[in-house]
Image: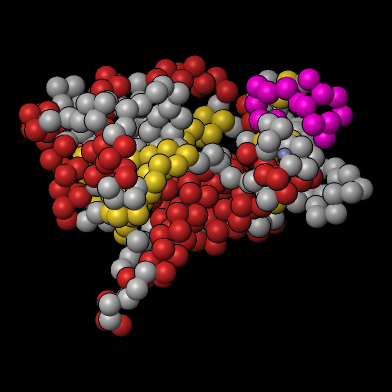
């Protein structure tokens, strides 16, 4: 923080702050009053590629250009303070490394923290209202079982956050070569989503309470991306014979993997219509939800939570000149699970 306005009493010069995905909202609708500015009835102003509209930054109809600059002016209500100071680090390099790891907490971090917290609480509340057959089988003692579909930047954050929340974590991916990585970062189980057999086994053996779907694509589109080694591993060839769920049946197969009162949460952006069969959801009281980042208050909570538990994304720091190459790589699928962080000091 290099300058602080007179009304921004929560900040002082020298504070380390970040800006998430929003820089403005109306601050007066029911969503804003509920600390959920991301669902502002009058549309929040996104940090990149949006037009300012709520007069918090002076002129409206000015396009936001994200953090691609060495200075950033933001309304204090949309700045997030990090719980450390530059002096806490031995060297500039160490400080910069931590900053790079903290940046994705304001996007991928909050995007996963918000639904993790919300739906685990919902599952526990429902369990608490159910009649308990005996003190030995208190349902709340059974860990909540949470599946995370997709192991890209969002999925890895989800698994890391969940691994500190005393729940059983299931990594669900169409790529068998991500199993080792999923377990390294905290997943208890790995399930191959491209296998109907594996998904059905999931239902039989576990029945998940929650599935957080970070993938915007359906199985056939995923398979079109060359994220498995050429020719596929023996496991993937075997699973092709097994059967890959078709895009039309994917959500039904997923709903079947959920326990009664289970929650399926759409997080990865999918803009295409999808097929679901009502009875698959009705028969088992399965709920279908969507979740978008989180409000500023919860973003602050995410940063504090991740700092306390030392949860950070794995990042690759790149220079501004690397961007075209990285975009090409990402188009082929993010198999490394890493987030790319652009070093702003390389801006010219
Ligand atoms: Zn609003």
Residue 59 part of the magenta segment:
yes
Figure quadrant of the C terminus: top right
Residue appearing at x 45%, y 54% in the figure: 119
Residue 23 falls in which quadrant of the image? top right
Q: Is the magenta stretch mostly helix, strand or loop?
A: loop
Residue appearing at x 89%, y 49% in the figure: 7
Residue 188 part of the magenta segment:
no
Report the coloring of the rendering: secondary structure
* Magenta stretch bounds: 45-61
Residue appearing at x 50%, y 21% in the figure: 322
Figure quadrant of the N terminus: top right
Residue appearing at x 43%, y 27% in the figure: 270
Residue 127 falls in which quadrant of the image? bottom left
Answer with the quadrant where ligand 1 appears in the image.
Answer: top right
Q: Is residue 281 left or right of residue 8?
A: left
Of residue 187 and residue 52, the one placed in the foreground of this image is: 52
**Placement of 131 over or under 294, stated as above or below:** below
Residue 342 visible somewhere in the drawing: yes
Q: In this view, does 170 lie to the left or right of 16?
A: left
Of residue 187 and residue 89, the one placed in the foreground of this image is: 187
Residue 183 visible somewhere in the drawing: no
The x, y position of residue 332, in whole percent, is 35, 21
């Amino acid at each position: 923080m290099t300058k602080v306005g007179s009304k921004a009493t929560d900040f002082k010069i020298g504070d380390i702050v970040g800006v998430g995905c929003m820089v403005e909202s109306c601050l007066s609708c029911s969503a804003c009053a509920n600390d959920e500015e991301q669902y502002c009835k009058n549309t929040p102003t996104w940090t990149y590629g949006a037009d300012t509209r709520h007069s918090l930054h002076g002129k409206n109809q000015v396009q936001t250009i994200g953090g691609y600059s060495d200075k950033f002016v933001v309304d204090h209500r949309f700045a997030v303070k990090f719980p450390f100071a530059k002096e806490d680090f031995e060297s500039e390099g160490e400080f910069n490394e931590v900053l790079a790891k903290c940046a994705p907490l304001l996007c991928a971090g909050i995007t996963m923290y918000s639904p993790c917290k919300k739906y685990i609480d919902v599952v526990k509340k429902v369990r608490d209202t159910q009649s308990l057959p005996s003190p030995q089988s208190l349902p709340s003692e059974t860990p909540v079982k949470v599946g995370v579909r997709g192991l890209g930047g969002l999925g890895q954050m989800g698994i890391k956050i969940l691994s500190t929340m005393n729940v059983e974590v299931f990594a669900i991916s169409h790529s068998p070569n991500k199993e080792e990585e999923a377990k390294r970062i905290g997943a208890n189980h790995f399930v191959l989503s491209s296998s109907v057999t594996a998904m059905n086994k999931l239902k039989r053996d576990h029945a998940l309470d929650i599935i957080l779907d970070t993938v915007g694509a359906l199985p056939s589109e995923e398979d079109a991306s060359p994220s498995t080694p050429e020719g596929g591993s023996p496991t993937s060839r075997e699973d092709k014979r097994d059967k890959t769920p078709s895009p039309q049946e994917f959500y039904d197969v997923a709903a079947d993997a959920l326990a009664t009162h289970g929650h399926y949460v759409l997080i990865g952006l999918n803009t295409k219509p999808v097929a679901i069969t009502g009875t698959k959801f009705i028969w088992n009281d399965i709920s279908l939800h969507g979740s978008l980042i989180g409000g500023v208050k919860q973003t602050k909570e995410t940063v504090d939570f991740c700092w306390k538990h030392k949860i950070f994304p794995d990042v690759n720091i790149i220079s501004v000149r690397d961007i075209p190459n990285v975009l090409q790589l990402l188009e082929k699928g993010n198999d490394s699970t890493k987030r790319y962080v652009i070093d702003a000091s390389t801006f010219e």
